[in-house]
Amino acid sequence: MGWVMMSARELNRMEVPAQIDDGRLTVENGANILGLTRRQVFRLLR
């Protein structure tokens, strides 16, 4: 099995939606962290 290299931005883009899904973060806060709109965050969650 090989290594998967990810930038900090890519890691954030995976971790923030997981935190929103778990209820540890609001959609509004997640959107601010990622620099996206609420609508874009909802699309990521789908």
Image (cartoon, rainbow, N blue to C red):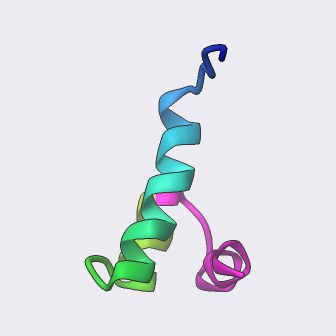
Q: In the rendered view, would you say 31 is above or below 11?
A: below
Foreground of the two, 28 or 12: 12
Q: Which stretch is magenta?
A: 34-46
Foreground of the two, 5 or 1: 1
x%, y% of residue 3?
Answer: 60, 15
The quarter holding residue 36 reads: bottom right
Asked whether residue 28 is in view, the answer is no
Left or right of 12? Residue 23 is left
Magenta-colored stretch includes residue 40: yes
Q: In the rendered view, would you say 3 is above or below 42?
A: above
Left or right of 2? Residue 7 is left
Q: Quadrant of the C terminus?
A: bottom right
Principal SS element in the magenta part?
helix
Q: Quadrant of the N terminus?
A: top right
Q: In the rendered view, would you say 14 is above or below 29?
A: above
x%, y% of residue 38?
Answer: 59, 83
x%, y% of residue 35?
Answer: 54, 59
Residue under the point 59% across and 39% down? 10
x%, y% of residue 16?
Answer: 44, 62
